[in-house]
Amino acid sequence: MDNRKTTEKVLSFLENGRGDFISGGDMAEKLGISRNAVWKAVKELKNKGYIIESVSNKGYRLSEENDIISLEGIKAHMKKENPCTAGELLVYECVDSTNNIAKELALKGAPSGTCVVAGRQSGGRGRKDHEFFSPEGGIYMSIVLTPSFVRFSANESIIKYIGVSVCETIKELTGNEALIKGNNDIFISGKKVCGILIESGSEFDSDTFQWLVVGIGINFDPDVSAFPEDIKERSASLFKPGQANISKNLLIADILERICDIANADEKDVFAKFEKLRIK
């Protein structure tokens, strides 16, 4: 078996049992691999920065403090019945722009729920092609949506739904009261913690969109004091470095699921929620 695939399977097993010890023998039997292969996979994961406890007669346990964005970690928090599972989930350490990758996939016919996630961006973009500072400690994700999935009568409703979804997820998981400034920026206590960029491909003759890419960048726990001077004073993060009480993977999974639920959203309800969250 390919070593990479073995490591991914072991990580998925540990993520799904996070916090509990799992014996190497049980893991090997259920995964159909040798105990030595399990040991090698655990060693490789530790080398990548994963915090895994190893205790004789107990086995292995992925620490609750571990917070590395991963495909396996995100999937461990997702509900199987969610329509997002129809789309591919791609996770990277660093890319130029998750929106760029998602747009390429959309042009190739990627289904709704296709999502690109990265821990850093080297060429992140905001509205009007402004640079979007994307350091380590953030969450950068782009989601593909198609017309059959979005039944709103106006594009404005889509923008509002995305903002409301991010605010509600942040409030539910962190307790922070997140509000919307304009249509694209999320603020907490008067400072920006999240930016949203929606891009689309349209059909010229009918002037209807063929696909949307919803880009979301969140300051999860970066060191804001190290931000460039021109944005430092107006920026904030959900958590101080190393002090998060939820994982990035959980927040990503919940935002992805909530946005994919746009297929079931009520347009009037979205407008009402948006007005309550809008910074006047």
Image (cartoon, grey):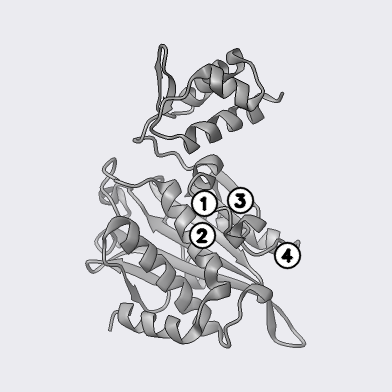
The mark that comes first in sequence, 2 or 4, is 4
Label 3 to label 2, Cα distance in Å? Answer: 10 Å
User: Visible in this render: residue 135?
Assistant: no
Q: Residue visible at 29% across and 79% down?
A: 279
| Count of numbered marks | 4
277 over 140 or under it: above or below: below
| Cβ atoms at labels 3 and 2 below 8 Å apart | no
Which amino acid, by three-letter code, is at mark 4?
Leu
Q: Which-is-in-front pick, marks 1 and 4?
A: 1
Q: Which-is-in-front pick, marks 3 and 4?
A: 3
Label 1 to label 2, Cα distance in Å? Answer: 9 Å
User: Visible in this render: residue 77?
Assistant: yes
| Cβ atoms at labels 1 and 2 below 8 Å apart | yes
Query: Is 114 left or right of 25, judged from the image as shown?
Result: right
The mark that comes first in sequence, 3 or 2, is 3
Q: Which-is-in-front pick, marks 2 and 4?
A: 2
43 over 251 or under it: above or below: above
Q: Which-is-in-front pick, marks 3 and 1?
A: 1
Label 3 to label 1, Cα distance in Å? Answer: 12 Å
Q: Secondary structure at mark 1?
A: loop
The mark that comes first in sequence, 3 or 1, is 1
Along the line of sight, the residue nearer the viewer: 139 or 124: 139
Q: Which residue is mark 2?
A: 256
Along the line of sight, the residue nearer the viewer: 150 or 14: 14
| Quarter of the image with the N terminus in it | top right
| Cβ atoms at labels 1 and 4 below 8 Å apart | no
Q: Which residue is mark 1?
A: 78
Mark 3 neighbour density, 10 Å: few (under 14) some (14–19) many (20 or more): some
Label 1 to label 4, Cα distance in Å? Answer: 26 Å
At which x and y percent is residue 10?
A: 56, 28
Which amino acid, by three-letter code, is at mark 3?
Leu
Q: Which residue is mark 4?
A: 107
